[in-house]
Structure formats: C-alpha cells, structure tokens
Amino acid sequence: MIKNKDKKVKALILLSGGLDSLLVSKLLQEQAKIETLYLKLPFSKDKTKEIKKFCKENKIKLHIVDCTKGKLFKEYMDMIRKPKFSRGTALNPCIDCHIFMLKKAKKLAKKIKVDIIVTGEVLGERPLSQNKKALLLIEKEAGLKEKVLRPLSAKLLPETEAEKKGLIERNKLLDIQGRQRKKQIFLAKKYNITFPSPGGGCLLCEKEYCKKLKFLLKKKLTYQDIKLLSIGRHFFASQIILGKNEQENKLLEKEKGIKIIPEQPGPTALIRLEKKQNKEKLIKKAKTLIRKYSKHKIKKFEIKSS
Ligand code: SF4
C-alpha cells in the first residue's frame, strides 16, 4: 500500500527520559506527525523538567501521566507487589512494568486518535525486557500485538502493522542492537541532542534500596515512603529516619511528621507516627538514636510537627 504523502501518520512516542526515546522522536518526525507521552513512575528518577525542555525546544506536543498518585499509583504498586512475570536482579519487574506503560499509552492513543505507538526500546539493550521474545510478549499482553513500533531496532524485529500498511517506511528505520551505544551517540550528534546520561535511575534495580522496600511492601505505601526510603538510616520499619548528612537532614526537616533536631551538630530524626502509637515513646527512641549517631554530646533538641 502506498502512503498518501500529504497525510502523515500520527504517532505517540513513549518518552522515558533516556537518549533512545529522544532519538526516536527526531528520527520519526520525518515520517510521522508525532506526540509524546511521559509516564512519571514512582520508583524512577523524575525527568519531567528535562523532557518538557526537550519537547518545547523541538515543538513536540507532550502528554504527562503522573503515576505517583491516586488510582494509577495504586495500580502500579499492585503490579510491583505481584508481578505476573519474573523480576530482574533486584525487585524490578521490568516486563510487567513495560506492559503497564504500554497499556497507559494505548489508552491515550485511543483518546487522541493516533495510529501507532512508538518506543525507544533497543533489542538486547536490557536482558530481561528487551530481548525479542520479551518485546513481543509485552506488546501482546498490552493488547498491542504488531502495533508497537521500535524504530531503533525495527529492521531486526517482525514487521509491524504500520509498516505492512505502508504507513511507515521500514527502510528508513534502523537495526541497532545490544548495549553498546556508539550508534546512538553518533545519532545524538547528528540530531544535536545534548541530552542525558544513559538510562538508570530506577530504584527497583538497586539491591540495597530493595532490601528495605521488600520489608515495607507488605504495608500500604505512599509516594512519600518511596522517596524517603532512598535517604537516611531507617529504624523500626521506617518509623524513625535519621539523616546521614546535612543535606539529608534538610530534606527530612521538610517532610511531614515529627522532626527532632539536635541543638548541637548531629542527625535530624523524622518520626512518622501511625495511628494508636505512643508518640512520647517514639520521641524517646529517636533522641537515643540521635545521640548514638552524633559525635557530639547532645543535650537539647528542638521538636517540630507538621
Ligand atoms: S527499570 Fe524500573 S522503570 Fe524501567 S522497566 Fe524496569 S521496573 Fe520499570
């Protein structure tokens, strides 16, 4: 089928904040009218600012879906607790996470009437979720069989519906494979993308973080819990958190809860009180911990509540 040259196909590109998906938006602009989607995920580094900047500079429409609150947060956390497929080296259920993301993209695509969903995935770049079998499984599970275009590796993957229909020209797509990023760096220079450090940024891949998380997953968690788990020393199932340095002390002082601040240099403690708990008992425990982790003899404390 020959494409009507006046009418570009409409594509929704999932932006992760990494280089690959940014390259895809540049690569596909020639063939498609593009819009982008950024899903703000609870355990991933927030890239909203960088993505907004990129989209503004390149005059690309951006949709942001915040999965750190409300129903979407709950849905995401349910998936983290009980993934259908296997986890990676820590608690990261990457296959389920990709299915979650594609389902959200599918919903938006329907609403804004786009023809294809596009991702920046590269074959073989991540062992668990970016091998051929996993890529095909993910799109099938998301109800998007043959409907997800991965332009960076498209020539190494089965033809998608859009290519079969002639909506996208396969010969203009690429055949990048593996973890080496030479081709992506070359393309970044070509497209003048002065963007980001490679991938990473997901707390679910960090073993030390996940040791603490595993314990807390049995409880109802908030986004605040998730953020706080990555800083400080945690005691009594994270009910008392002690700052490890000045920067962490300042962060803890901004959080909701009871803050115990020593008058001499030392760690700030954040107490997160649960219903029916003895406040005085926890304050006493926090003061003991502060004294233990301070080099100075602490005599007085300031107590703030918010
Ligand atoms: S690394 Fe984290 S954000 Fe990325 S797919 Fe895996 S679980 Fe999801």
Image (cartoon, rainbow, N blue to C red):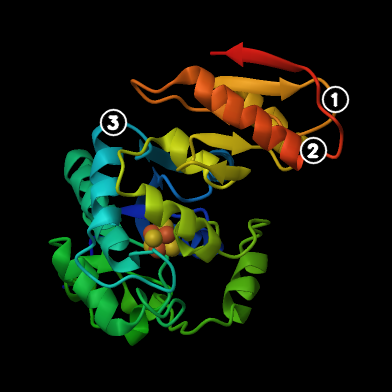
- Under mark 2, the amino acid is Ser
User: Which of the marked residues, 1 or 3, is nearer the chain's N terminus?
Assistant: 3
Tell me if the residue at label 2 has its CB under 8 Å from ligand 1.
no
- Spatial CA distance of label 1 from label 3 is 40 Å
The residue that appears at 43% across and 21% down in the rendered structure is 278
- Say what secondary structure mark 1 lies in: loop
- Spatial CA distance of label 2 from label 3 is 39 Å
The reply to whether residue 59 is in sight is: no
Q: Are marks 1 and 2 in contact (CB under 8 Å)?
A: yes
Judging by the rendered image, the residue that carries numbered circle 2 is 294
User: Which of the marked residues, 1 or 2, is nearer the chain's N terminus?
Assistant: 1
Judging by the rendered image, the residue that carries numbered circle 1 is 264
The residue that appears at 67% across and 33% down in the rendered structure is 288
Q: Are marks 2 and 3 in contact (CB under 8 Å)?
A: no
Residue 170 or 290: which is nearer the viewer? Answer: 290
- Say what secondary structure mark 3 lies in: helix
Percent from the top left, x then y, of residue 266? 79, 33
Tell me the crowding category of disc 2: few under 14, some 14 to 19, or many 20 or more residues within 10 angstroms, Cα based.
Answer: some
Judging by the rendered image, the residue that carries numbered circle 3 is 70
